[in-house]
Structure formats: C-alpha cells, structure tokens
Image: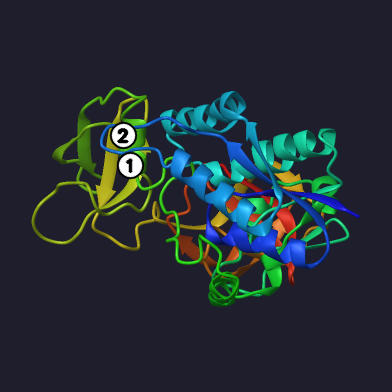
Amino acid sequence: MTRVYVGMSGGVDSSVTAALLVEQGYDVTGVYMKNWTQDLPGMKCPWADDLADAKRVAVQLGIDFKVFDFEKEYKQNVVDYMIDEYKAGRTPNPDIMCNQEVKFKLFLEAALADGADMIATGHYARTENGMLLRAKDENKDQTYFLYRVTSEALERTLFPLGGYLKSEVRDLAKERGLYTASKKESMGICFVGKVGIRDFLSQYVEATPGKVIDKQSGKVLGHHDGAIFYTIGQRHGLDIGGGLPYYVASKDMDKNEVYVTTQLNDEGLWKSNVALHSLHWIGQQPTDGEYHIRIRHRAPLITATLQGSTLQLSEAQRAITPGQSAVIYDGEVCLGGGIVIQ
C-alpha cells in the first residue's frame, strides 16, 4: 500500500485532501508543518489553532498524525528572503518561495526519510508524469505559486483537489462532516494570517520618512514613512489629498523617495517588455516562441513571446513590479517562469 504524507494546515482544502486519499485506499499520515509561531502586535499567530484543527480532522479520519518543525529553515529561506527583497525595493512573493524551499523540498525530503512514498497537499493544481497542469477551478488555480517546484518533486506529489471546484470541495467536507468544513479561508501573508505586509515589515525595518514627489513636475507633494512600504501601481496609503488619485510610478531606494503620478498611462505604470532572472523550468527549457503568461495570481492569461530571458507581451500590462514572478504556460501545462527584473 502506498504511504502518503499529507500536509495538513488545519484548513478545509488539506482536510478534504486527506479524506479523499483515505477513501482511495492510500496509507495516509497527516503532517502539520510548524513554520511560523511568532505573534505580532495586535495579531496572534493562528498556528496553535490550526494545529488543533488539523489534529481533530486526523482523529476523525483515523489516520496517524505528526508535526514537522521547519521554523528555523522557514525563517531563513522564506521570511528573511522576503524582508531582504522589500529592503531592495522589490515586491517578492513569499508563497512561491515557501513552496520551493519548504513544502516541496524540506517536507518532501523529511517525509521520504520517514518512510513515505509520496506527499500530498491541498493545492488546486494537477500533476502528470512530473508535469504541472492547471486546475479545473480557474479561479482557484495555484500553479502560479508552484512554478518553481521541480519535476522530481512533482513525480512524488499528489494534488487530489486539482479536478474539483472550490465549492465542490466545501460540499465534500460537509458531506463527510469534517471539523473544518465551514472554516474560513486564511487570507493575508501566508505565514502571519490577517496582518498586512506593512504591519509585518514594520517589525523588522525602521521607518525612515522621505519625500513623495510628483514625477511630472518634481514638486514635493508630501512625505511617507519608508519607500520600502510602497509598490508600483499602489494608489492607497499615499495620504495626498485633493484632485485626481495618485499612483506610485517608481521609487528611489537610495534616496528613499517615492515618485507618483496622476496619469494612468504613465510609462512607469505600464510594461510590454519584461526581463526575467532566476529562471526555473519544470521540465526541459522551452524554445523561444509564443506562450501564455500570468503576471500575478488570478491575473488573466495573456499572450507573450519568449526570447531567452525576456518576454514581449502582446499588450502592455499595468503595475508589473520587480520581484514579482512571471509564469509561463503552454496550454494547460505550466512550464515554469522567472522573477521580474524590470
């Protein structure tokens, strides 16, 4: 019998994942990954509640349950990476790094070393012969966050929810009476729940006031409490009153200045040529040519031409920000992608 270790986060998706695998005849063990336990001012980290929920579901299903402690590695590989990227003026995606470094590397290695044949998670994605394919539920599809996983890891991974809509997963949980059936989605940063990125960063970065400057006129419009807290295309939180709304068009991290514009067609807000670094391909490197790409999770797929490490978009896109990922698709198959330079 195939032994599968299921990453159980205490949410409905991973609970249903475990239930389906039990019903399909696998020898299932639930595993809670203890990645982050730190409270923040005004925000209690929900890890203990999530662990208790995961444990309750494991008891319901009659499966073994373990806790893998990755807190030290998570801080180094995900949290510190995120903070360093923001300090450099970029906008990283910690969920992507978590999948690359923790769930499909550390967890996979620890599970196999502990006697598992495969791992499973509650991601909305599909895998086939080491390839990554988009999920049935286009609105929930999470291949954007998984593009840096290796084909070797995917060959050892099950995604039971890939063929379901989110609404169907809720129904499956209710039909089985799972403890987490009505639990709300966790929102916000992957590891600290509802707290906003600004509140999180302020715990690690000293607020340094600087100027907010009109890009067109050079006039100082106001002051901010740190260029690190702003991202390209941002409209809210600028605290500039009156008239047309302002948008962040660019930043100068050395001078700690934020440049804004009221012009929605400003060249700083739109890009049709995107340079990438840290390219990762799940299988073989694709040949240059036309593909579909996604610039952010849930963004519509758009056509682009891949030329080496650059993408020429069929139509300019707003607020493409250094540090974000561009993910490349050939039909349903997620080929991989890279991190935006400019």
User: In the rendering, which numbered label is found on residue 188?
Assistant: none
Identify the residue at image location x=36%, y=48%: 194
Q: Which element type, helix, strand or loop, lies under badge 2?
A: helix
Residue at image x 26%, y 37%?
42
Of helix, strand and loop, which one carries label 1? loop
- Which quadrant of the structure image shows residue 158? bottom right
Say whether residue 133 is visible.
Answer: no
Q: Which mark is residue 227?
A: 2
* Residue under the image location 48 percent in, 53 percent down: 320
Question: Does residue 83 appear to the left or right of 161 in the view shown?
Answer: left
- Residue under numbered circle 1: 230
Report if residue 28 is visible in the image: yes
* Residue 224 position within the rendered picture, expressed as x and y whole percent measured from the top left: 21, 36
- Mark 2 burial class by Cα count in 10 Å: few <14, some 14-19, many 20+: many
Hey, what amino acid is under mark 2?
A: Ala
Q: How many marks?
A: 2
Check whether the beta carbons of the residues at disc 1 and disc 2 lie within 8 A of each other: yes
Label 1 neighbour load within 10 Å: few <14, some 14-19, many 20+: many
